[in-house]
Amino acid sequence: MRNTANIDALIDEVIVLDDNPAVDDAMILKLQYDLALQLHPFEEIAIRYGLGTSERLYKYLRGHPNVVANVKKLRAMLESEEGVESRVRIKALAATENLILATASIAADPRIPAQQRIDAFKQLNRVGGVDGSNAANSKHAAIGANFVLNIHFRSGEEKIVATVANHEEVARSNPKHLSLEADEDGEFDEEV
């Protein structure tokens, strides 16, 4: 029993935070979120991040004013008088920020299947605003929500048929009459 307590005490004393808050460290983001939400006592938060006591947590925070400033901003947003939708959006944005590093790790890990790595890469591009979707959306009036549909054929089918319609064609015809078929070169020819 004594060894268990010693092991727990040893583990609780390992600091899991980076000394430099300018480093985009996921643990610092989680600490900020924990401090802003105040769901747990400061003693528990201190143990969670390897600081052991609330006094050591206080000393850490005194030495890292950027962390304190970010906690204050996050707390102000969470406690604002805005509606539930705005507060939920803020929490979702904070959670998204926390997952950026994990998503980048998935995209870069060669042990993960290629399709999952590609999906992680696409999501990072979308969050970063470099996927071109904003530019494409601003040039064309949308008639519905944008989406991506991935279909994987396991049976080795070579012929792909897709129905495509733009907003002018929808207004004057039935989109079921428009289709595209891939030829031998993988080129699509419109079929009416």
Image: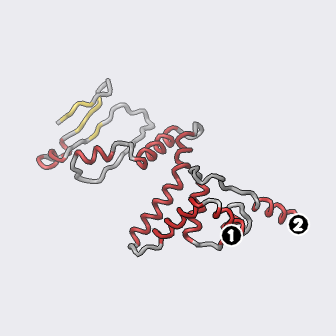
Q: From the viewer's perspective, is 154 left or right of 5?
A: left
- Going by the numbered disc 1, the residue's amino acid type is Glu
Q: Which mark is residue 2?
A: 2
State the image quarter where residue 29 is shown. bottom right
**Above/below status of 58 relative to 102:** below
Q: Secondary structure at mark 1?
A: helix
Instruction: Name which of mark 2 and mark 1 comes first in the sequence.
Output: 2
Q: Residue furthest left?
A: 172
Name the front one of labels 2 and 1. Answer: 1
The amino acid marked with disc number 2 is: Arg
Q: Please provide percent x and percent y for residue 30.
A: 58, 60
Task: Tell me the tag on residue 44.
Answer: 1
User: Where in the figure is residue 115, as x and y percent of width and height?
Assistant: 48, 40
Q: Is residue 32 left or right of residue 46?
A: left
The residue located at (16%, 48%) in the rendering is 170
Q: Quadrant of the C terminus?
A: top left
- Taking the spot 41% from the left edge, 72% from the top edge, the residue there is 84
Could you tell me residue 118's position as x and y percent? 47, 40
**Image height check: is 173 above or below 183?**
below
- The residue positioned 19% from the left and 34% from the top of the image is 191
Q: Where the N terminus falls, by quadrant?
A: bottom right
Is the Cβ of the residue at disc 2 closer than 8 Å to that at disc 1?
no
Most foreground residue, 11 or 32? 32
* Callout 1 crowding tier (Cα within 10 Å): few <14, some 14–19, many ≥20: some
Report helix, strand or loop for mark 2: helix
